[in-house]
Image (spheres, rainbow, N blue to C red):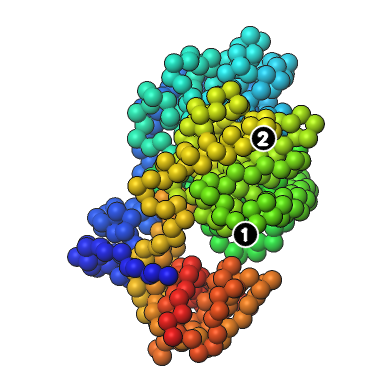
Amino acid sequence: MQLRVRSLDERLVDRLAGALRIRPATARCLVARGVTDPRDAQGFIDPRLAALRPPAGLAGLSLAVGRIADAVIRGERIGVFGDYDVDGITTAALLTSFLRAAGAQVECAVARRDAGYGFTAAAASDFAERGCKLVVTGDCGTSDLDAIRTGVARGLEVIVVDHHTVPSADVAHPALSLVNPYRTDSTFPFRGMASVGLGFYVAASVRTELRERGHFRARPEPDVRDLLDLVALGTIADLVPLAAENRILTALGLRRLHSRVRPGVAALLAAAGVQPDKEIDARTVAWKLAPRINAPGRLGPAEPSLALLLADSDTAAARAQALEEANTERRAIQDKVMEEALAMIGDSDPGPAIVLAGEGWAHGVVGIVAAKLVDKFQRPAFVVGIDPATGIGRGSARTAAGINLYEALSAAAREMGPQMGRYGGHAAAAGFTLKRDAVPALAEALCTAVTRFAEGSGPITAKGREIDAEVRLAEVDERLAQELSGLGPFGQENPAPLLVTRNAKVTAVRRVGDGSHLKLTLDDGHAIRSAIGFNLGDRPVDIGHAVDLAFVPTVSTWQGRRSAELELADLAIVS
């Protein structure tokens, strides 16, 4: 293991450390992220809504805002439809919450996995039957042209709020408005927003429009800050970059999540065993909240999750328990599929891309299995569940080493021709369909595409890491952990700071949990600290070893006492 500390301009580091009165290690992490001016650094550490860039240039927004405002003022019934994952569900919950608070009549629904991805003709017809004149889709609709045409034929106007790749600029989109930063005519400077973030911009802009038209003279004006918890949930869960607007919205949304003011969120945190005083960070969302919100939609209808996010205090606990039970069932199904997938790979090298298909694998868990395979093998993974009755496979993909999944699937589709079915998604996550007998051709095409995309960027299995700063063990204290946590939330394009300390002596070793986690006590002669290495239990570390450690400083709470702890990313035995 090489623990190379990145080279930085130390004058910039010293300037930031002095101006902000922060530790040199924290200043190094800021400079490593391109934040070198003290004023910019202060804004990075303490993000504000005022720092969001106005959505001027976001194609389709102005038309969408005007039409939604018309519907609210006229008292038209508005349909809101979201996809079945967390981004789609939170987008639907956000738009429904806002529009109802603004006085609109809203009919809301979310997609069913067994009906296929996205907005469907059946959903369009259902909204027409419910008396809707306008439908707003969230996290879907960009590629659902036939379904939207069905809605138009039934007298609907459809507005699409989505962040998935626009298939072709040559095809006229049947929606009244397509709010999507990937439109070729969109000039908004950041394309990486989740659909729920775009939904926030829509809500804020509609509020401004309604205010200017005098709509709130006789009724309370909704506070869009109340929606930020939903933005954080969807943005973190959808694996979009936690940079620019996403980072600001997510940081503020996490603060609102921590306040637990939404009854459904408070109930779900309690059901998941998250203590009331536990700070809600991106990891809590990714590991505790998002899997439970996703669980019903992985097994059947996703409506229970939408109902939870819209629940009042009287119904929230029962709805959260339903999600908890669905998550337990989902986990059991997922573990079985993962076991079968690993058996298929065996001891062989899985190649540049992992492509696996299984008869009867539940469509709802193949995305999780793909993510776990990426973690284990550091390759892009494409996992397909095949319906034994129809022979149709529905797959989900997750990425590694910067491979753009949508581009990889597009390249595979060009190679396979009509053998490739429908596909969509974005760089980090994608879905697709194909017939059972096309799986070998898909594997060959994807391996070719991934190999080509990886050329010039080093081997896709490389796990080399650059360290932000080197510190002594005594420097790893609660203050440093708190300073570094202020650089979050961490995720895509804003990874957690990685530090190194060298030549620490191991004075105690335990393997905890099921033996897969490593618990150490360390002493460098000046300080004693504890460390936890998740999934590092197989490392041959023993008492008396001297080790170099790559880690993230955290704060551990045990029996009411707080202390600094090293969360290990890697380690090397030096003697």
**x, y percentage for residue 111?**
68, 31
Q: Is residue 251 visible?
A: no
Tell me what residue is drawn at x 40 percent, y 62 percent: 465
Element at label 1: loop
Alpha-carbon span between mark 1 and mark 2: 26 Å
Tell me what residue is drawn at x 46 percent, y 80 percent: 573
Q: Is residue 341 above or below residue 91?
A: below
Q: How crowded is mark 1: few (under 14 residues within 10 Å), some or many (20 or more)?
A: few
- Label 1 or label 2, whichever comes before in sequence order: 1
**x, y percentage for residue 305?**
70, 41
Closer to the eye: label 1 or 2: 1
Which label is found at residue 394? 2
Residue at the left extreme?
Answer: 11
**For mark 1, what is the residue?**
347
Q: Can residue 465 be seen in this view?
A: yes
In which quadrant of the rendered image does the C terminus lie? bottom left
In which quadrant of the rendered image does the N terminus lie? bottom left
Q: What residue type is labelled 2?
A: Arg
Q: In this view, does 97 lie above or below 61?
A: below
Left or right: residue 228 versus residue 3 is right
Which label is found at residue 132? none
- Foreground residue, 530 or 546? 546
Left or right: residue 250 versus residue 376 is left
Left or right: residue 252 versus residue 359 is left
**x, y percentage for residue 493?**
41, 50
